[in-house]
């Protein structure tokens, strides 16, 4: 792995570790044992997700469970987990369908309501199960009510993707910014070349937003029309792009030369307005900004741009294994599950190509 990319990975890992440490300080103290115990078998991001979900769970118990009501997190002991029954966990899953974030200080409660679909509930149940399994194995507790709770059934959703005209509208909006607010238009002239390169890359190659922000200048090869990305788990892959993506990237690199990074040794491809590597969150907000005016009837995220590319590639080639490889899916069944609906359109296209009578 190139030194610049390794440095970026180390920095991201350090940020995640610091983030997790801050979250653990908001949980019952005994949870440190659990998180230390699963450190060797889970990623930092997984543990961050578990920490968020367990904070919500303990907050629910302190507000609603007769044996926890009025308790402070610091007073909860691992043996108190034996007081929780399967029905309590089922009530918690119902509670998180729509809830107000818990805070031990009422003044810190936010007015915003949080929604959870079946997948969100499943993730929260997974965090609770993991914790109970750990403490049961270590003999801190005698029961595991989470193991008796059924996983919420996840209803498959149709893929939300952009049609060809919607992709064109989105790219036009990035270039012109005609429908942006006055405040947004003030910054548009400074960022439109970069924004067009990012969105073109996302929708034109299907890479993940994390893979996009991780790109370095040296990763781009215009001779082979490709760049190298780092997949989940650190595996590298060569991704190919077309003429429109090449043009957008070339224009941006020319712009970047005139607006170098804050640190001259920083090889990050896409830079923020402060001259540092752009973050995943910044790209998400940027896509949302343009999509809200260009594609008003769909909620478009970077992942939806990835789905758009995957669908188009499948419709063009009919090769589910190729799509799985390009998108970086470890299991082709994951790809097939997401693109099953697309097979109907492929079958229709194939049927229309068959002539019963020769011309």
Image (cartoon, helix red, strand yellow):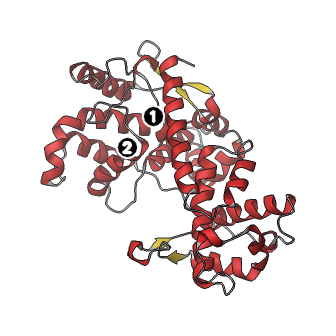
Q: Position of residue 96 (x, y in %)?
A: 57, 74
In the picture as drawn, the residue positioned furthest to the bottom comes out as: 66
**Residue annotated with mark 1:** 212
Position of residue 118 relative to residue 321, above or below, is: below
Dot 2 corresponds to which residue?
A: 283
Image location of residue 57, percent across then percent down: 62, 71
Circle 1 SS class: helix
User: Residue 180, position in %: x, y?
Assistant: 19, 52
Marks 1 and 2, Cα distance to the nearest angstrom?
9 Å
Q: Residue at x 67, y 55 (%)?
A: 32
Q: Quadrant of the N terminus?
A: top right
Residue 272 visible in the snapshot = yes
Q: Quadrant of residue 74?
A: bottom right
Spot occupied by residue 17 in the image (x, y as percentages of width and height): 56, 43
Task: Give 59 or 328, whichever is nearer the viewer.
Answer: 59
Horizontal placement of 304 versus 291: left or right? right
Q: Is residue 73 left or right of residue 242?
A: right
Identify the residue at image location x=47%, y=20%: 4
**Residue 202 numbered tag:** none
| Furthest residue in direction front, as rendered | 75
Element type at mark 2: helix
Q: Nearer the viewer, residue 200 or 38?
A: 38
Marks 1/2 in contact by CB < 8 Å: the verdict is yes
Label 2, residues with CA under 10 Å away: few <14, some 14-19, many ≥20: many
Q: Would you call the spot at circle 1 few (<14 residues within 10 Å), some (14-19), or many (20 or more)? A: many
């Amino acid at each position: 792995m190139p030194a610049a990319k390794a440095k970026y990975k180390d920095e991201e890992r350090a940020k995640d570790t610091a983030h997790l440490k801050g979250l653990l300080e908001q949980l019952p103290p005994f949870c440190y044992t659990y998180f230390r115990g699963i450190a060797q078998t889970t990623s930092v991001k997984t543990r961050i997700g578990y920490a968020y979900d367990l904070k919500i769970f303990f907050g629910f118990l302190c507000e609603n469970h007769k044996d926890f009501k009025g308790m402070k997190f610091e007073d909860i002991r691992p043996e108190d987990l034996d007081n929780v029954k399967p029905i309590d966990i089922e009530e918690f899953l119902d509670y998180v369908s729509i809830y107000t974030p818990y805070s031990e200080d009422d003044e810190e409660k936010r007015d915003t309501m949080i929604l959870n679909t079946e997948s969100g509930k499943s993730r929260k149940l997974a965090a609770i199960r993991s914790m109970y399994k750990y403490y049961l194995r270590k003999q801190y507790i005698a029961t595991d009510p989470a193991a008796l709770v059924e996983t919420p059934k996840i209803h498959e959703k149709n893929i939300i993707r952009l049609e060809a005209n919607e992709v064109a509208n989105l790219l036009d909006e990035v270039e012109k910014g005609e429908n942006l607010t006055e405040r947004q238009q003030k910054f548009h002239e400074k960022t439109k070349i970069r924004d067009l390169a990012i969105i073109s890359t996302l929708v034109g190659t299907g890479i993940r937003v994390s893979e996009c922000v991780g790109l370095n200048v040296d990763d781009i090869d215009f001779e082979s029309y490709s760049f190298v990305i780092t997949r989940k788990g650190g595996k590298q892959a060569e991704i190919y792009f077309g003429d429109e993506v090449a043009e957008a990237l070339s224009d941006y690199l020319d712009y970047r030369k005139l607006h170098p990074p804050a640190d001259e040794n920083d090889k990050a491809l896409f830079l923020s307005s402060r001259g540092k590597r752009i973050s995943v969150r910044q790209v998400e907000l940027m896509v949302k900004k343009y999509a809200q005016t260009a594609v008003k009837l769909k909620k478009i995220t970077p992942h939806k741009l990835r789905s758009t590319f995957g669908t188009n590639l499948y419709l063009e080639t009919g090769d589910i294994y190729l799509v799985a490889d390009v998108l970086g899916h470890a299991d082709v069944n994951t790809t097939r599950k997401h693109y099953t609906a697309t097979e109907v359109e492929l079958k229709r296209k194939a049927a229309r190509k068959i002539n019963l009578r020769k011309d």
